């Protein structure tokens, strides 16, 4: 299964690891299908590390919710690692505090293995080019994004290589 995040900087196609992390995948895909991420800002960015999004456009960066009515448990899998640019992982505030927020790595971050649930990866050259543009968007010293970086809308695909 895959989705395309249509952002103000271009498209990001994400392969979602549905079989490995089913609860996380179900949450993410249901939020995508409900238009929850429409107009969601990329609110935190650290070049050379990651960019974060997933708060509703009206809620501010501290809002993170799930389809389960509350935050939900981690699905840490030793085979899914923060080992490459383009890895997509849940943002959290500690163990089992997953909601709607997620981040995309600009570089490997092995210190996050065992702490955050990896649930996807960026696929295709267009997505990697968009990730470069997102990394170039200005942010202040605390990571607050100052430039235009937002999810416009999301398309859901049944096949990771589907157009």
Image (cartoon, rainbow, N blue to C red):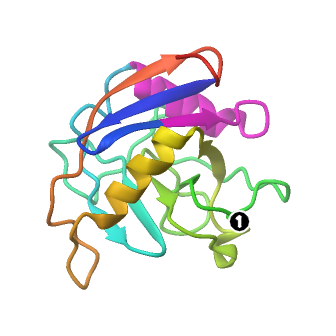
Residue for point 62% across, 34% down = 15
Point out the image quarter for the N terminus.
Answer: top right
Residue for point 14% across, 66% down = 146
In the visual, does 75 lie left or right of 162? Answer: right
Residue for point 66% across, 62% down = 84
**Residue 21 drawn in magenta:** yes
Q: Nearer the viewer, residue 68 or 83?
A: 83
Residue position marked by numbered label 1 in the rendering: 83
Q: Is residue 91 visible?
A: no
In the visual, does 2 lie left or right of 20? Answer: left
Q: Which picture quadrant has residue 19?
A: top right
Q: Nearer the viewer, residue 163 or 58?
A: 163
Q: Is residue 118 above or below residue 110?
A: above
The segment highlighted magenta reads 13-33
In the visual, does 65 lie left or right of 115? Answer: left
Taking the view exactly as shown, the residue that stands out farthest to the right is 79
Secondary structure under badge 1? loop
Q: Nearer the viewer, residue 73 or 85?
A: 85
Q: Is residue 63 visible?
A: yes
**Residue 25 drawn in magenta:** yes
Q: Where residue 94 appears, x then y in whole percent?
A: 55, 69
Q: Where residue 95 appears, x then y in whole percent?
A: 61, 65
Total numbered labels: 1
């Amino acid at each position: 299964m895959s989705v395309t995040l249509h952002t103000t900087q271009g498209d990001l196609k994400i392969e979602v690891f549905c079989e490995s992390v089913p609860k996380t995948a179900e949450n993410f895909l249901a939020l995508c299908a409900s238009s929850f991420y429409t107009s969601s800002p990329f609110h935190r960015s650290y070049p050379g590390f990651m960019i974060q999004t997933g708060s509703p456009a009206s809620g501010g960066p501290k809002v993170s919710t799930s389809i389960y009515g509350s935050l939900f448990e981690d699905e840490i899998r030793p085979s899914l690692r923060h080992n490459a640019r383009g890895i997509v992982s849940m943002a959290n505030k500690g163990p089992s505090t997953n909601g709607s927020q997620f981040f995309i790595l600009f570089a490997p971050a092995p210190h996050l293995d065992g702490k955050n649930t990896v649930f996807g990866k960026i696929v295709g050259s267009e997505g990697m080019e968009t990730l470069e543009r997102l990394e170039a968007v200005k942010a202040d010293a605390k990571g607050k994004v100052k430039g235009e970086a937002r999810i416009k809308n999301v398309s859901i695909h049944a096949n990771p290589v589907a157009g």
